[in-house]
Every structure is written in C-alpha cells, then in structure tokens.
C-alpha cells in the first residue's frame, strides 16, 4: 500500500484488497492503522514515525482485520518515499505469515 505522510491510504494492491475483503474505492483515504488489530496499532505508529524521522526502513510483525472480522497475521515492511525536499509518504509491503 502507498500511504501519505498523514497515514491515509493512497493506493492498495489487489492482493491487499482481496486479503481484507474490501472494495478498492472504500480503502482509499482510510488511515492504515485503522486496518490493524487494536493491540497492534501502537507498534505500527512507532514504526512509521521512526521511518519518517530517520529515513531507515522498518519491518514489524502485525495483524490486520478483514471485513468479515477475521484476523490475518502479516509482516509489514515499511519504506519512506522521499521527494526532492521532504517526505512524500511511505510504501508498506504487506506479507501474510503463518499464524503463531
């Protein structure tokens, strides 16, 4: 997914949309953290703030909540997208992982 510096989703892959069971139009402008299980949101916010602050990429284990309420274990790989003068947001690679 591509997110803005305000953490809203600008674009999402078909794989992410299918995994969550949502419509492509419905996911745009939603805060990415709203798709995460409540207990996982703080770790994501810490990771994204660290990426924007340092420019270094981050990788965290997390859980996303699908439209049907099921929880999907995922790994989030986060990298900043930099413009000429400032951050333009981030790209988040969402990879499903085996339940732990």
Image (spheres, helix red, strand yellow):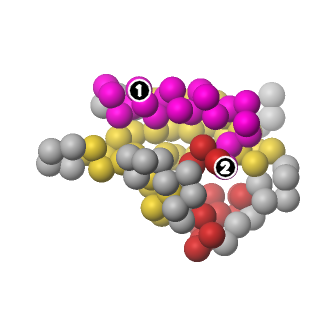
Residue visible at 72% across and 58% down?
Answer: 20
Q: Is residue 41 magenta?
A: yes
Residue closest to the far front: 6
Dot 1 surroundings within 10 Å: few (below 14), some, or many (20 or more)?
Answer: some
Q: Which residue is mark 2?
A: 35
Q: Dot 2: what SS?
A: helix
Q: Where residue 77 appears, x then y in whole percent?
A: 50, 38
Residue 26 visible from this viewpoint = yes
Q: Where residue 56 appears, x then y in whole percent?
A: 34, 28
Dot 2 surroundings within 10 Å: few (below 14), some, or many (20 or more)?
Answer: some
Residue sitting nearer the eye, 35 or 15: 35
The reply to whether dot 2 and dot 1 touch (C-beta < 8 Å) is no
Residue closest to the far left: 84
Q: Where residue 25 appears, x then y in whole percent?
A: 58, 74
Residue visible at 73% across and 30% down?
Answer: 39
Q: Which residue is mark 1?
A: 50
Q: Which residues are magenta?
A: 35-54
Q: Earlier in the sequence, mark 2 or mark 1?
A: 2
* Quadrant holding the C terminus: top right
- Left/right placement of residue 92 relative to residue 33 reads left
**For the residues marked 2 and 1, what is the alpha-carbon distance in whole angstroms?**
20 Å
Q: Where residue 78 appears, x then y in whole percent?
A: 46, 38
């Amino acid at each position: 997914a591509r997110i803005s510096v305000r953490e809203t989703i600008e674009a999402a892959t078909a794989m992410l949309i299918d995994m969550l069971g949502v419509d492509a139009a419905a996911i745009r402008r939603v805060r990415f953290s709203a798709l995460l299980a409540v207990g996982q949101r703080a770790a994501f916010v810490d990771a994204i703030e660290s990426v924007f602050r340092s420019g270094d990429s981050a990788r965290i284990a997390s859980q996303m909540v699908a439209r049907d309420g099921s929880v999907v274990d995922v790994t989030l790989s986060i990298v900043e997208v930099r413009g000429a003068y400032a951050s333009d947001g981030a790209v988040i690679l969402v990879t499903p992982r085996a339940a732990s």
